[in-house]
Image: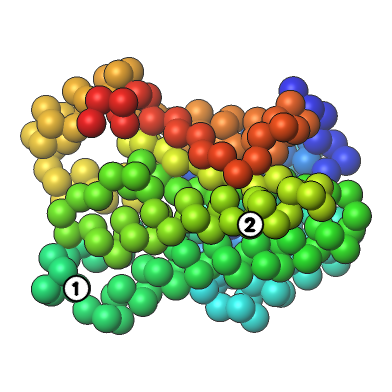
Amino acid sequence: MTDMSDRVALVTGASSGIGRATARAFAAKGARVVLAARRKHELDKLVTEIEGQGGKATAIKTDVSAAQDVEKMVAHAIEVFGRLDYAVNNAGIEGQWAGITDLTEDEWDRVLDINLKGAFLCMKHEARAMLDGGHGGAIVNIGSVNSFLGFQTGSAYVASKHGLIGLTTSVSAELAPQGIRVNLVCPGFIDTPMHRRAREIVGDELYDEGLIPNVHLQRAGRPEEIAQSIIFLCSDEASYITGTTLTPDGGYTLTI
């Protein structure tokens, strides 16, 4: 696997789950890591952990739905580490699950602002930094199996994740000739705080008897497993992969 010791990686939503695991994976490969999320205290703990293991990391509180925050986030990466090579746009929320007749406009806007507009704003500023640096780069957006599959009461979340497919393929077509690859990772059931909240809503019985049996591997995935997919797409080993969707879901979408 590519040595990333001279590279800089930015990870949004790095305070927990897949984002946290991805930041750790980049650091283990030698990359200098920029951690972004709304919960700064969690980021600071991760910085301490990474530095305690000999890595280099910095943290910045960021709301990806706010253009000013995103611009500051990328500027911070350049100020601290001098360049940007990899960007993982992982920040996202599930929002409130509600039927279409009950879903409020404010809640719709909140979910789309973070999950979809946030990815747009991040790529806008990440791409500028990569182009200015002249080294090329790789961007990975994080979708979901719900980028393909809908579910009752999930219209805002599902719409935001579907939108990432079109956003990713369009930006890939634009940036690939300039040396920047853009891909989408769509995880299945992964043992994260968001996933555990969803399990509480659907109930253990439906989860254990109705959902997990449709996963070929018969289990939820681990955040670290998804992190390795992300690392691969950023690496030089994936140099001919852009505009595509990788679906590490244990075989779930092949069954549905």
In primary-sequence order, the first of circles 2 and 1 is: 1
Residue at horizontal 71 percent and vertical 68 percent from the top: 125
79 or 102, nearer to the observer: 102
Where does residue 200 sit, x and y in percent of width and height? 18, 47
Residue at horizontal 38 percent and vertical 48 percent from the top: 147
Q: Which mark is residue 20?
A: none
Residue at horizontal 16 percent and vertical 35 percent from the top: 207
Where does residue 235 sit, x and y in percent of width and height? 73, 33
Left or right of residue 54: residue 98: left
Where does residue 117 sit, x and y in percent of width and height? 50, 70
Name the element at disc 2.
helix
One can see residue 45 in this view: no
Picture quadrant where residue 251 is located? top left
Q: Quadrant of the N terminus?
A: top right
Report the label total.
2
User: Which residue is identified by label 1?
Assistant: 103
User: Which residue is identified by label 2?
Assistant: 171
Q: Quadrant of the C terminus?
A: top left
Kindly give the residue lying farthest to the left in the view shown: 205
Report the amino acid beneath label 1. Leu
Left or right of residue 152: residue 94: right
Left or right of residue 112: residue 62: right
127 or 212, nearer to the observer: 127
Mark 2: few/some/many CA within 10 Å (<14, 14-19, 20+) = many
Picture quadrant where residue 69 is located? bottom right
> Marks 2/1: CA distance?
30 Å
Residue at horizontal 74 percent and vertical 26 percent from the top: 237
Report the amino acid beneath label 2. Val
Name the element at disc 1.
loop
121 vs 7: above or below? below
